[in-house]
């Protein structure tokens, strides 16, 4: 048993590890939850019924935005309509090296649980929102995301923007824990 200031150092070391890891998760979660970034570099990819005014991705703290595999990400697309729309379907694709792959959405009907009230009126402002889980199996990769709101098989709204997918940071915390466990809190000759 190692004692410092009347306290058992071996027990303090375990407590320190737990507190450090919990504090790191809390800090990481709070920072992620509040980071939101406007994506100025989005491209219109053929919208026929709306003009996009802004795109916000959460969490996002870099350019291009980074999303973490195994975590959730939210998007808010503000737009001004130029045409009426009744049945609106949301579709998302990821393109890697010009290969376009569909990405399943939790709710493809854009008129349900997406902040839109359908039918959409012409000459009105709306905000489409969606939160989705980034699959945990995705490797570290840069992709171009395409988000479409489709009406009558036409791209009523279509935007593209770059995203960088990174692996979950839980592995980082495991490595930190392993390093901290190997650290001697006091030199052996002081015990």
Image (cartoon, helix red, strand yellow):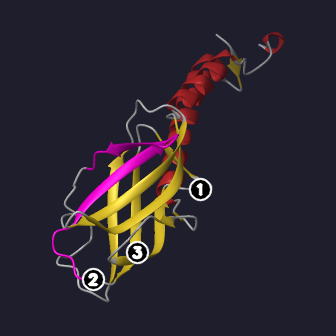
> Circles 1 and 3: CB distance less than 8 Å?
no
Residue 142 within the magenta-colored segment of the rendering: no
Q: Position of residue 129 (x, y in %)?
A: 33, 65
**Alpha carbon of mark 1 to alpha carbon of mark 3: how far?**
20 Å
Query: Residue 78 got which mark?
Result: 3
Mark 1 vs mark 2: which is more N-terminal?
1
Q: Of discs 1 and 3, which sits in the foreground?
A: 3
Q: Which residue is located at x 27 percent, y 87 percent?
A: 122
**Alpha carbon of mark 2 to alpha carbon of mark 3: how far?**
15 Å
Q: Nearer the viewer, residue 123 or 12?
A: 123
Q: Of discs 2 and 3, which sits in the foreground?
A: 2
Task: Specify whether 89 is left or right of 47.
Answer: left
Q: Is residue 163 above or below residue 90?
A: above
Task: Specify whether 80 is left or right of 62.
Answer: left
Mark 1 vs mark 3: which is more N-terminal?
1
Q: Position of residue 138 (x, y in %)?
A: 44, 33
Q: Is residue 134 above or below residue 177?
A: below
Q: Residues within 10 Å of mark 1 (few under 14, many from 20)?
A: some
The part of the chain drawn in magenta is 83-105
**Residue with the mark numbered 1:** 61
Q: Which residue is located at x 32 percent, y 77 percent?
A: 49
Q: Of discs 1 and 2, which sits in the foreground?
A: 2
Q: Residues within 10 Å of mark 3 (few under 14, many from 20)?
A: some
Q: Secondary structure at mark 2?
A: loop
**Residue with the mark numbered 2:** 83
Residue 8 visible in the current orientation: no
Instruction: Give the total number of marks visible in the rendering.
Output: 3
Residue 99 visible in the current orientation: yes
């Amino acid at each position: 048993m190692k004692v410092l200031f009347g306290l058992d150092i071996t027990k303090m070391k375990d407590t320190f590890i737990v507190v450090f890891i919990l504090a790191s998760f809390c800090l990481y979660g709070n920072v992620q939850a509040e980071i939101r970034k406007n994506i100025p570099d989005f491209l219109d990819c053929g919208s026929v019924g709306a003009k996009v005014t802004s795109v916000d991705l959460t969490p996002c703290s870099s350019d291009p935005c980074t999303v973490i595999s195994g975590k959730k990400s939210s998007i808010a697309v503000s737009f001004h309509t130029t045409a009426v729309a009744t049945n609106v379907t949301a579709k998302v694709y990821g393109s890697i090296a010009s290969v376009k792959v569909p990405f399943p959405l939790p709710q493809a009907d854009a008129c349900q649980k997406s902040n839109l009230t359908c039918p959409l009126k012409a000459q009105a402002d709306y905000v489409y929102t969606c939160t989705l889980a980034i699959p945990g199996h995705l490797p570290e990769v840069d992709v171009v995301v395409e988000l479409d709101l489709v009406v009558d098989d036409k791209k009523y709204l279509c935007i593209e923007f770059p995203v960088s997918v990174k692996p979950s940071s839980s592995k980082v915390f495991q490595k930190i824990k392993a390093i901290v466990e190997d650290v001697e809190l006091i030199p052996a000759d002081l015990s």
